[in-house]
Image (cartoon, grey):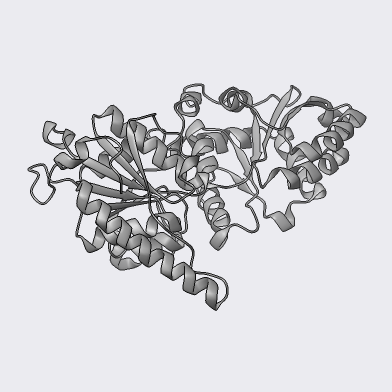
Amino acid sequence: MTENRKSYLIALAAGGTGGHVFPAEALAEELLERGCSLALLTDKRGAAFKLRNGEIDVHTIRANRISGGIMAKFFGLADILRGIFEATRLLRKIRPALVVGFGGYASVPTMLAATRMKLPTLIHEQNAVLGRANRLLASRVSAIATAFQNVERLRKADQSKVIRTGNPIRPQIAAVRQDLYRAPTKDGPFNLFIMGGSQGAGVFSRILPDALALLPVDLRARLRIVQQCRAEDLGYVEEAYEGMGVNADLRTFFNDIPEKLKEAHLVIMRAGAGSVAEITAAGRPALLVPYLHAMDDHQSANAQAIEAQEAAWVMSEPNFTGEALSGFLADVMANPEQLSVRSGAARNLGIADGASLLATAALNLIPSNGEGCPPKSAAYETRGAAA
């Protein structure tokens, strides 16, 4: 980044779920390290952001979904139009050199305002299916950063704008990549790590005990299980495992995920964008069970993209039964070379420096001579300028 660019302000448009929030947080950290000034334009859920205190100005922009009945759609559209007006007024005031959006309806008013003002714009798509908000914006923005090589529902006309940056991941997860995978022996301990997530732990808590009950006793004795469970499932799963003599560490939350990944011979997990990015960057073999009700079935697309590179196995939720999982576990425990193949493919596919690549892609959209990208206004020098 040039010294000229250091004087510029970059606006981030994001809000809502962690899938949109975390990449924005990661990019913010990277840009701050590179000397940039930042503003966050978010909706009322912006409190979910964990940003450096006082280093990023946060502005609330009205936004809403356009869904439901006629009245709900009417009020949703009204909120978006009002949000575009609010965002336009703010962007004119703070005069950013670049605006970056992260999908979700919270980003729409700001990104529409930015494109109407002909500011340099970038959107980041975390999944293997272009989300609804980003579909609306794709033809209007300057560039599209993607996590996956191929993204469904992206028009041919917009392909030339694509820059693959991957998804930002935690540095601690990236560090796991340095510990090369070691497959289990055919008669040694087998470390199985089940990452549930807020929406996925229930199905794993139901199916895993059924599957382990069907395993031969000698295979069951080899298992060392680490599993995330919902609080309401913890007692049931614990009792089931104790009854089978299974060695298990069950918790509702693990604060040492990198260590658990480092030790895991196999991970069973959902196929959210962040989780897939982490498991491939870490280079660990996984069985992916896409969340059945994910928007646009994007988790299935994520999982299939990884499976196509032989970097993971995929089992759809309807097919994720005790019998099917038991057969799968028996096979990989008896043939651990399969795990090594998947681990190597995952590592080759994974991107460990997504935040850095995304920051570079963003900064490259700012003209080096500053033409068309005025530096931040003097009015913005006062931190916390009101919208």
- Name above or below for residue 310 compared with residue 4: below
- Give above or below for 181 relative to 96: above
- Return the residue nearer the eye: 7 or 295: 7
Residue 81 visible in the snapshot: yes
> Seen in the image, is 212 located left or right of residue 368?
right
- Residue beneath the point at 51% across and 25% down: 176
- Identified at 65% across, 49% down, the residue is 289
Residue 104 appears left or right of 117: right
The quadrant of the picture occupied by the N terminus is top left
Image position, residue 196 (x, y; %) = 67, 40
The residue at the far bottom in this view is: 70
Q: Where does residue 36 sit, x and y in percent of width and height?
A: 24, 34
Rendered image quadrant of residue 181: top right
Is residue 160 visible in the rendered image? The answer is: no
Residue at 80%, 40% (x, y): give it. 232
Q: Residue at 45% of width from left, 45% of height from top? A: 46
